[in-house]
Amino acid sequence: PELLSEFQNCIFDGKTLVQNCSTSSPNDAELIWLRNTLLSLLDVKKVLDFGCGIGLFVGLFEGFDYTGADLTPAMLETASQKNPNSNFVRAGGTTLPEPFEPGSFDLIFTRAVIQHNIEPVKSEIIRGFYNTLRPKGYYLAHEHDLLNKGGGDSGVAEYMRSFGFELIASNSPYGFLFRRD
């Protein structure tokens, strides 16, 4: 799918969506790695795009049973308008797996979500991912600074292992594929 054609950076200023901000978007190589990684996982059907915002990555999941989740109603409203055939749900990381059943998804995806949280909230979100994924499910992350230590992948595998996730692939320094035990 043409992934970059609809990509518009945005933020939510508390009242309205602000388009074309200066935040960085994934480049073509990163998007290709994400899509190829998804397609290599033959046991993945149900995916959760956690922190989906306005649904920028719906196209990445073409052919999968997609659900987008975000905390911000305005983001979800925009996502639903832009992607009327996709499912969007209001959900927060510290309360996962609510509103889903434990083990509901084969894969959870985040793009620049975890990096904006600090401990203990970051740990609560990762534990929620563990509970929301089926056993041997996957967490696909595109995070510029997952550990808030200046970026890169130093220490990421060890950190995620402490929550029951094994690093099985990476596209250093931003792309990570983990499998739940």
Image (spheres, grey):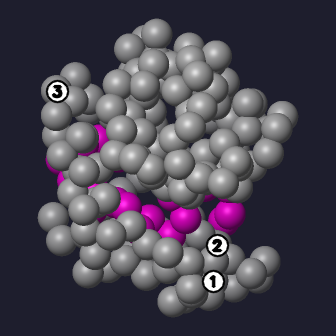
> Which residue is drawn at the image coordinates 37% and 61% (left, top)?
57
* Element on which disc 2 rests: helix
| CB atoms of marks 2 and 3 within 8 Å | no
Q: Nearer the viewer, residue 150 or 101?
A: 150
* Element on which disc 3 rests: loop
| CB atoms of marks 2 and 1 within 8 Å | yes
Against 118, is 104 above or below? above
Left or right? Give the position of 150 relative to 27.
right
Q: How many marks?
A: 3
Circle number at residue 74: 2
Q: Nearer the viewer, mark 2 or mark 3?
A: 3
> Which residue is drawn at the image coordinates 75% and 30% (left, top)?
124
Where is residue 79 shown, x and y percent of the image? 47, 69
Circle number at residue 42: 3
Q: Which badge, 1 or 3, is on the more N-terminal residue?
A: 1
Q: Nearer the viewer, residue 90 or 49?
A: 49
**Quarter of the image where one finds residue 42:** top left
Amino acid type at mark 2:
Ala
On the image, numbered disc 1 is attached to which residue?
A: 17
* Element on which disc 1 rests: strand
Left or right? Give the position of 144 relative to 98.
left
